[in-house]
Amino acid sequence: MTITLPVPTPDATCCAAVTGGVLSIDEAERLAHTFKALGDPTRVRLLSLIAASEGGEACICDLTEPVGLSQPTVSHHMKQLVDAGLAVREQRGRWAYFRVVNDALDRAAHALRP
Amino acid sequence: MTITLPVPTPDATCCAAVTGGVLSIDEAERLAHTFKALGDPTRVRLLSLIAASEGGEACICDLTEPVGLSQPTVSHHMKQLVDAGLAVREQRGRWAYFRVVNDALDRAAHALRP
């Protein structure tokens, strides 16, 4: 029996690269949106904490102490990461759980090193 | 005549990755500094313009018109890219010339996709 796993549809906007020709304004805005979300030390630490968590997901309740910030502040940072497509959020009862979107990190890396 | 621009020395802190374990505060600050510089549409367009220029270098005098900004504003953006190690600057007479530091783009990409 052959099991076919879903293949992500190629994203037409996936392939703009900083060194792959002059970027259009739209392409530059999309890329900058991602990099801006990554342009804060707390946010890159939060991503690393989530990625290093068991099962690759973390409850917001476990993220506040390692970064030494209040839950509203961590929620605000996580919202920016989710808005940029770098993390996904799932509400389970009282708590929000987060996962890193590896495809989004791959696309951002591709933009720097095609 | 050949003009050689300075090549940055390899950085021992090159290899911290967002998904390679919990980042230290220092590692997170270094990475975020780079991504913050990339987190602006004008700056990623400037990098793409320089990378796409003949010989991989561009005079500031040729960068203002494509991005539609004044020279002081473009200079300010370029200073942030140089401070983040993403570009190098060389003064030749009246004009500043810039090159993209591909190693810095590679390191940033590696941090996202080791």
Image: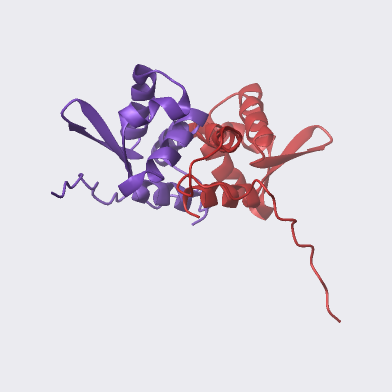
Chain colours: A red, B purple
**A80 vs B57, nearest the viewer:** B57
Residue at the bottom extreme? Answer: A1
Residue A92 as seen in the image, left or right of residue A110: right
**A17 vs A33, nearest the viewer:** A17
Q: In the rendered view, would you say B56 is above or below A114? A: above
User: What residue appears at the point 15 percent right and 28 percent down from the top-left corner?
Assistant: B93
Residue A36 as seen in the image, left or right of residue B80: right
**A26 vs A8, nearest the viewer:** A26
Q: Quadrant of residue B81?
A: top left
User: What residue appears at the point 18 percent right and 47 percent down from the top-left corner?
Assistant: B4
Q: Quadrant of residue A55?
A: bottom right
User: What residue appears at the point 48 percent right and 46 percent down from the top-left corner?
Assistant: A21
Residue A70, given in percent of the width and then of the height, sits at 61, 23
Tally of numbered tags: 0
Residue A71 as seen in the image, left or right of residue B84: right
Residue A31 as seen in the image, left or right of residue A4: left
Residue A52 appears in view: no
**A72 vs A8, nearest the viewer:** A8
Residue A109, given in percent of the width and then of the height, sits at 52, 50
Residue A46, given in percent of the width and then of the height, sits at 57, 38
Residue at the right extreme? Answer: A1
Residue A59, given in percent of the width and then of the height, sits at 70, 39
User: What residue appears at the point 86 percent right and 82 percent down from the top-left corner?
Assistant: A1
